[in-house]
Amino acid sequence: MSTIEKVQEEVLVEEQLGINHEIVLYNDDVNTFDHVIDTLIKVCKHTSEQAEQCAILVHYKGRCTVKTGSFDELKPLCTQLLEAGLSAEIE
């Protein structure tokens, strides 16, 4: 009979404080794909391909993370998205 030894490792994960926020864009029945894409390019500095992919994800999945960063960095961007008529929030 052999003995099986289980070793449990403790892994520490450092969280980068302040950089774990994201802007989530939500689907709506008001805005066109073109408006969403143009707004993401303007506000979030997405490439046209990236903005189009986000718009498609929002349409089919109902939501998509469009930007990550610190709360202070994301707040004015989220405000601009809201002012453009999009549905977004910082999580």
Image (spheres, rainbow, N blue to C red):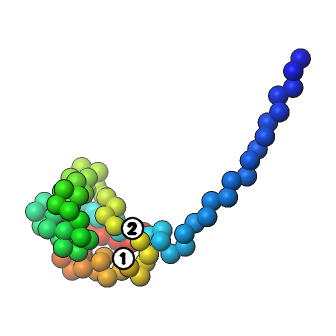
In percent of the image, x 68 and y 53: which residue is there? Answer: 11
Question: Is residue 53 rendered to the left or right of residue 11?
Answer: left
| Quarter of image, res 38 | bottom left
x then y, percent, for residue 85: 18, 74
x then y, percent, for residue 36: 17, 65
| Quarter of image, res 43 | bottom left
Q: CA distance from mark 2 to mark 1?
A: 7 Å
Question: Is residue 82 rendered to the left or right of residue 90?
Answer: left
| Quarter of image, res 40 | bottom left
Relative to 19, does residue 48 appear above or below in the rendering? above
Instruction: Decide which of tag 2 and tag 1 comes sooner along the chain.
Output: 2
Tell me the number on the disc at residue 68: 2
Task: Report if residue 90 is visible in the image.
Answer: yes
Relative to 82, does residue 4 appear above or below in the rendering? above
In percent of the image, x 10 and y 63: which residue is there? Answer: 34
Callout 2 touching callout 1 (CB < 8 Å): yes
Give the farthest residue toward the top.
1
x then y, percent, for residue 57: 26, 52
Relative to 47, does residue 2 appear above or below in the rendering? above
Amino acid at the residue labelled 2: Thr
Element type at mark 2:
strand
10 Å crowding of disc 2: few (<14), some (14-19), many (20+)? some
- The residue singled out by tag 1 in the image is 74
Amino acid at the residue labelled 1: Leu
In percent of the image, x 30 and y 70: which residue is there? Answer: 88
